[in-house]
Image (spheres, helix red, strand yellow):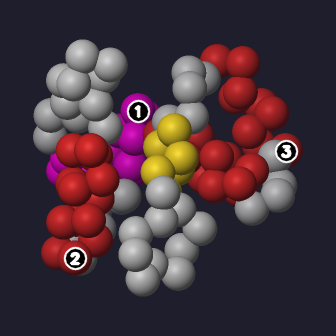
Amino acid sequence: MDNNQDPVYLRVLRQEFKRLRTAEGKGMVEKVRAGRSRSSSLLQLADMVSGAVVRAHLGDDQYLKLVRKRMGKIIWLPKSQGDPSIGSPFV
């Protein structure tokens, strides 16, 4: 989310991450905060992988093929009511 400060975007993102639960019902994400990928190689990796997942969902899986065998499960969150987007992919 590369330092996106849009309050609506941050609120929706936090809500979606809070919905992610383990089989036992425990939350999988404790905190969501904005950051600059320029200063973090882990954020750069997350940007690349999430971009690859979105592109694959849109029909271009060439980048996902590069990282797929090293990834865990991909969870596709359903669209929100009234949301024209394709849904929210989370890795």
Counting residues from the start of the chain, the first of labels 1 and 2 encountered is 2
Is 35 displayed left or right of 66 in the figure? left
- Residue at x-position 24% and y-position 16%: 24
Quadrant assignment, res 7 = bottom left
Image: 25 above or below 56: above
Position of 56 relative to 58 (above/below): above
- The stretch in magenta equals 32-43
Of tags 3 and 1, the one toward the viewer is: 3
* Mark pair 3, 2: CA separation: 32 Å
Q: Mark 1: which amino acid?
A: Leu
Q: Position of residue 75 (x, y in %)?
A: 51, 38
Residue 34 covered by magenta stretch:
yes
Looking at marks 3 and 2 on the same chain, the residue that comes earlier in the sequence is marked by 2
Q: Residue at x 77, y 31 (%)?
A: 66
Q: Check contact, mark 1 vs mark 2: CB within 8 A.
A: no
The x, y position of residue 82, in whole percent, is: 42, 83
Marks 3 and 1 close (CB-CB < 8 Å)? no
In the structure shown, which secondary structural element does the residue marked by tag 1 occupy? helix
Residue at 59% in and 68% down: 86
Whether residue 28 is visible, yes or no, is no
Query: Dot 3 corresponds to which residue?
Result: 62
**Residue annotated with mark 2:** 8
Residue at figure coordinates x 22%, y 56% from the top left? 15
Tell me the crowding category of disc 2: few under 14, some 14 to 19, or many 20 or more residues within 10 angstroms, Cα based.
few
- The residue that mark 1 highlights is 42
Of residues 48 and 30, the one nearer the viewer is: 30
Given the image, on which type of amino acid does mark 2 rest? Val
- Answer whether residue 56 is magenta in the image: no
